[in-house]
């Protein structure tokens, strides 16, 4: 009997899971969950989704904050989620500066590919949820469906959509994305 395919969802961090400060989140004291994010992540966990955070953190490469500070925020975020019964399968961060020519900064797909190397799943039944064009492009380049949230940079991103770059869905926040994700 063949094992069943995993249910995977990729989610950007800043502007989707947490409030985007319109600058880098440099410490845990600056971190605030977006309204509805905890409820959304709990539902996805309860429904058996492997939640994978995919985030560009150019502030590390650009010397604005340290990689250890970035991981401190991540670890505290995951601990706080755990208090609510949320399980994060994994996280991949691009820490290269904005002007570095790396192969992992979204909209490139290396972070997504690395995150699922060991998983059997159906890309066509997988979503990438984000608030920026680079999130939508990364999801589409990877072969996943995409959801644009209007939190963070999402409302501005919505104005920049083109006929060739359209998400599968546009919603107000991560919690509003959940019903679409559950339909896969």
Image: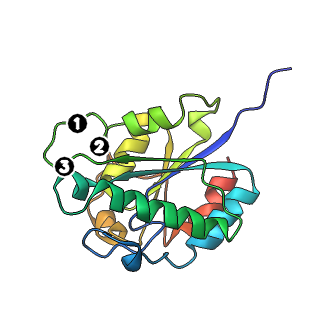
Q: Dot 1: within a 10 Å radius of its alpha carbon, few (fewer than 14), some, or many (20 or more) residues?
A: some
Mark in front: 2 vs 3: 3
The residue that label 1 is drawn on is 102
Q: Nearer the viewer, residue 171 or 90?
A: 90
The mark nearer the N terminus, 1 or 3, is 3
Q: Quadrant of residue 66?
A: bottom left
Are the residues at dot 2 and dot 1 in contact (C-beta closer than 8 Å)?
yes
Residue at position x 40%, y 39% from top? 111
The residue that label 3 is drawn on is 97
Tell how many labels: 3
Residue 44 drawn at (x, y percent): 67, 58
Q: Nearer the viewer, residue 166 or 84?
A: 84
Q: Nearer the viewer, residue 19 or 31?
A: 31
Residue 31 drawn at (x, y percent): 41, 75
Image mark for residue 105: 2
Whether residue 133 sits left or right of residue 90 in the image: it is left
For numbered disc 1, what is the local secondary structure?
loop
Regarding residue 122, the answer to whether it shows in the image is: yes
- Relative to 182, residue 115 above or below: above
Residue at position x 45%, y 38% from top? 112
Q: Dot 3: within a 10 Å radius of its alpha carbon, few (fewer than 14), some, or many (20 or more) residues?
A: some
Residue at position x 67%, y 70% from top? 83
């Amino acid at each position: 009997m063949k094992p069943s395919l995993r249910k995977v969802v990729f989610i950007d961090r800043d502007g989707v899971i947490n409030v985007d400060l319109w600058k880098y989140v440099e410490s845990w004291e600056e971190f605030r969950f977006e309204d509805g994010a905890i409820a959304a992540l709990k539902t996805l966990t309860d429904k058996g989704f492997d939640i994978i955070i995919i985030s560009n953190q150019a502030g590390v490469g650009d010397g604005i904050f340290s990689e250890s500070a970035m991981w401190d925020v991540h670890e505290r975020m995951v601990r706080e989620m755990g208090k609510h019964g949320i399980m994060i399968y994994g996280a991949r961060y691009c820490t290269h500066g904005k002007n570095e020519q790396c192969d992992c900064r979204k909209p490139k797909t290396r972070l997504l590919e690395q995150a699922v190397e060991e998983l059997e799943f159906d890309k066509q039944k997988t979503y990438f949820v984000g608030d920026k064009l680079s999130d939508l492009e990364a999801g589409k380049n990877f072969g996943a469906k995409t959801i644009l949230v209007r939190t963070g940079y999402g409302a501005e991103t919505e104005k920049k959509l083109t006929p060739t770059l359209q998400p599968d869905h546009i919603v107000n926040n991560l919690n509003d994305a959940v019903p679409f994700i559950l339909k896969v």
